[in-house]
Amino acid sequence: MSLPSSPRAAAWAAGLALAIAGCGSARSGPTPAGASSPSAASPLSVSGDAWPVLLHGPSHYGAAMVAGPTSAHIRWQLQLGGPAVPGAVISAADIAYAASNGGVLHAIDVGTGRELWSFNGGAEYGNDLSTSALLLGGGEVIWPGPRHCVFGLEGRGRLRWTVRTPGDPLTPVIDPVGDVLVVADATGAISGYRLGRRFAIPRLLWTRRLASVSYGNPAVAANGTIYETAGDSLYALSPAGQVRWTLRTSAQVEVSAAIAENGIVVFGSDNRDEYGVDPSGRLRWRVPIGNFTYSSPLALAGREVVFGNHSGQLKTVDSDTGRLIQLDQGRGQIWTAAAVDARGDVYFATRDGLIYGFDPAGHRLFAFDAGSPFDGYPALAPDGTLLIGSVAGTLYAIGG
């Protein structure tokens, strides 16, 4: 079922310079050969066709700049040796970086599904947390892996450094204002690190304990404000790690926040409500969504924000008002986020094991039954291939 709507906004651009730079040793697998002045209301986008971090950009804003699949043609599938819950990320060179809860990060050629190299983090990890690596402009990879470690890997998976966190690390992000690596973890701690030159070991600048637990990956606005969900709250922190304000809900928050084009920060709570908050911390709107949400929002150009819920509904809302623009109905709970392409086509998967594609008018493009639940977040490659991993451990590549 779909509600009438204007088409989802699509392509977006604004430059983002990415660069970066200690826990224990880990084993590496075989390695075959082969900006204008920012404002408080500005989200961050990523230029080019890459999908370098979970939810595409550091502020969880924007759709891919490529056209995704219109049918459920399985280009290839690859077993990752454990539940493929961590979301894949993809470089501009069409190399995907995907991990499983088995504790191994894989670099994969998107065109063929061939593994280029792997890095073993030394233990199993995770649960149903969808976290991703962070890709840097020089080919470096920052991976939130097992043993409470964040690994800094060079081009072919060679370990350069590790950083230990109090709990399972969430997806790292870079604050471009202070050139700071921001790392949160599942215990509700969040830290900032000074990036070293030539990918040297990062230096700890600050640490804050926000709550007893966190499931949200931090998002960063163009002015360096960091938004993190922890406990029952949304926190706004300065680039120096000072808490600027806190907005509490009446239940645990189990999603990340997204920063919309108008600066409104959107997130959901286990009280079955979705929230829109302006950059000063004032509640702009609060709307019931009918069920729990473990689906982090993705913000699009034109003020639209899209997220799922436990009723199998993917909702597109106006971030100014919370007004429902469109509803795409799937079967089963949606724990994944959405991926949106340059046409406005939207992709998501459900706990009933189905991968869906819908066009901007809400017409279903395809529904592929993979036979296993999905927790991990999808990503779109520069060639338009859709990548998403299942709880059964299979990474699916859907495309021409």
Image (cartoon, rainbow, N blue to C red):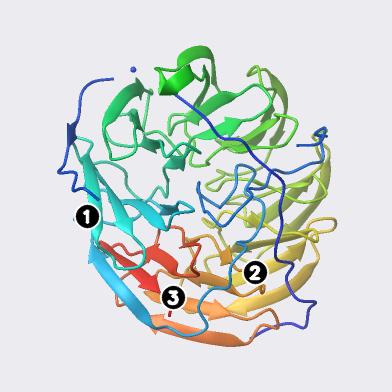
Residue identified by numbered label 3: 355
Report crowding for label 2: few under 14, some 14 to 19, many 20 or more residues within 10 A (C-alpha).
Answer: some
Residue shown at the point (47%, 33%) measured from the top left: 213
**Callout 1: 10 Å neighbours few (<14), some, many (20+)?**
some
Q: Quadrant of the N terminus?
A: bottom right
Q: In what quadrant of the picture does the C terminus appear?
A: bottom left
Task: Pick whichever of labels 2 and 1 is earlier in the sequence.
Answer: 1
Q: How far apart are marks 2 and 1 (CA)?
A: 32 Å
Using the image, determine if residue 77 lies above or below residue 218: below
Vertical placement of residue 124 versus 399, above or below: above
Residue 144, given in percent of the width and then of the height, sits at: 37, 36
Q: Which of marks 3 and 2 is nearer the N terminus?
A: 2
Q: How far apart are marks 1 and 3 (CA)?
A: 19 Å
Residue 62 position, x and y percent, is 66, 56
The answer to whether one can see residue 67 in this image is: yes
Residue type (three-letter) at the residue carrying disc 1: Gly
Residue 349 relative to residue 120: left or right: right
Q: Mark 2 points at which residue?
A: 342
**CA gap, disc 3 and disc 2:** 19 Å
Left or right for 50, reference 90: right
Residue for point 60% across, 68% down = 341
- The tag on residue 265 is none
| Local SS, label 2 | loop
Q: Residue 267, how many percent across, how many down? A: 65, 49
Could you say which quadrant of the image residue 287 lies in?
A: bottom right
Q: How many labels does the image show?
A: 3
Are the residues tagged 2 and 1 within 8 Å (C-beta)? no
Kindly check if marks 1 and 3 are in contact, taking CB atoms under 8 A apart as contact: no
Three-letter residue code for mark 2: Ala
Q: Disc 1 on helix, strand or loop?
A: loop
Can residue 352 be seen in the rendering of this structure?
no
What residue does disc 1 label?
82
